[in-house]
Image: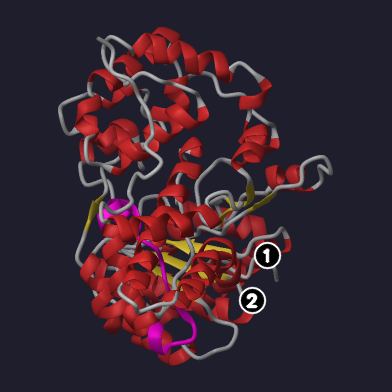
Amino acid sequence: MTAPLTLNPDRLFPAEPQTRAVARRLYDQVKDLPIVSPHGHVPPVWIADDVPFSDPTSLLLSPDHYVNRIMHGQGVDLADLGVPPGRDGFTAEQARNAWRIFCEHWHLYRGTPMKFWMESELVDIFGVDVRPSAETADQIYDAISAKLATDAFRPRALMDTFSITFIATTDDPLDDLSHHAKIRDDASFTREVRPTFRPDKYLEPGREGWGDLMDALAAATGEDTGTFAGWVAAMENRRAFFKENGAVSTDHAHTDMYMAPLDDAEAVYARARRGEASPEENLALRRAFMFEQCRMASEDGLVLTYHAAVHRNHHQPTFERFGADVGGDIPMAYNVVEALEPVLNAFGTHPNFRIVLFGMDETVYSREIGPLAGFYPSVYVGVPWWFIDAPDAIRRWRKAVTEYGTFYKSSGFIDDTRAFLSIPARHDMSRRLDAVHLAELVVEHRLEIDEAEEVVHTLVADQAREVFKIDG
């Protein structure tokens, strides 16, 4: 017998009746508010050209490393799941077979956030009413495919359906932002799509091909990237271009948060350009580059987001076969207080500087990031990211950071995804869990109901806009 697939309206709410009733009341006030997504990885070409989605696998599986890594951990070959996304030669029959593999492994997602948002996508977006399994895989695939063939399921229509009013993409510093210009110049499209400046590979002199990137940066800006001063001028040039084209933030992801000036930066930079710098010098130079990014942020006002402490591409054979961002990145321990001391001494109280800190170590939020945000006007606490963007971790995070940094020093919800159709489900999870946290405070008489109603509205409607300066 085929098992039905339904969504309980009280999912993620507490079992205790009094608290559940308050959570329902708070959630009902914000569940239908528009989505503001200030950081993510949806390709802008999808929206610029209103690109139709070809099949369920390329839309829901291949780009979602959260989903794929679970199956890979049980021995499934990523190639059989269409990884990397958009791989040449991946046939229609292979796409269908990848979906079958996913449905056969549906039990693996029990208790995970992936189950929450995949079920939300299947039921709320596609009207699927049977649980994924080996027996129902083709039925579900065909139902989704039929929907994707209609205009209502193209990216622009879905942005309307999802009520996404603002979404930021993640873009290379040398991108000409032509897709963003096309969107901006189309008067028929009223949703905001903004670029985000992501310069990581230009800040890592130890990586292969860094010298070629410096040559390309010089060609794009007319600056002499043979010197540290020229590199700074070139970065300022590209940041200004992004800001002129609507960017509100820059995004950075390195293995640590250390950022500090370098006394002999010109000499070290010269050695790095010649490929003669030591690993220690390359690391010090990268940290000096990041310090300069913070200095630039204090001048141009772009909000700096920092996603730290990930061992990227942990399994070298997988990286060589499939490339980056396919699930092989693993959390690391990291330091925040000491790492940020030089930057915060220089810019922590600067009225134009703002930094949003993300990590995957729950203890760092309560021990370091929350207290830093509580003191420094420039520091904000990023919502749980990646491995801890799960219901229980999100609730622990909210409890931990609010006591130190207050509701008003958190970032607003960040979906941080390239899986476009999971965006509403992720935001819904956040809204439900914030409602639960606030309901507990009300029931414990630590907050009045009118205060909770005001806070939940702020967290959903206003906080991200305020933190990311979206309205200027």
**Residue at 38% across, 56% down:** 21
Q: Is 380 colored magenta in this rendering?
A: yes
Q: Amino acid at mark 1?
A: Lys
Q: Horizontal placement of 74 versus 243: left or right?
A: left
Q: Nearer the viewer, residue 455 or 45?
A: 455
For disc 1, the marked residue is 243
Q: Write the start and end of the magenta stretch as one range.
A: 373-392
Q: Horizontal placement of 364 versus 270: left or right?
A: left
Which quarter of the rendered picture does the C terminus lie within?
bottom right
Q: Horizontal placement of 154 versus 419: left or right?
A: right
Real-space CA distance between mark 1 and mark 2, rounded to the nearest whole angstrom: 8 Å
Which quarter of the rendered picture does the N terminus lie within?
top left
Q: Is 234 colored magenta in this rendering?
A: no
Q: Nearer the viewer, residue 241 or 70?
A: 70
**Residue at 45% across, 10% down:** 92
Label 2 SS: helix
Q: Position of residue 327 (x, y in %)?
A: 29, 41
**Residue at 22% across, 23% down:** 105
**Residue at 31% across, 64% down:** 359
Q: Position of residue 87 (x, y in %)?
A: 43, 24
Q: Position of residue 221 (x, y in %)?
A: 66, 61
Q: Is 9 rendered above or below residue 231?
A: above
Q: Amino acid at mark 2?
A: Asp
For disc 2, the marked residue is 300
Please say whether residue 263 is visible from this viewpoint.
no
Q: Is 37 rendered above or below residue 64?
A: below
Q: Are marks 1 and 2 in contact (CB under 8 Å)?
A: yes
* Labels 1 and 2: the sequence-earlier one: 1
Furthest-front residue in this view:
18
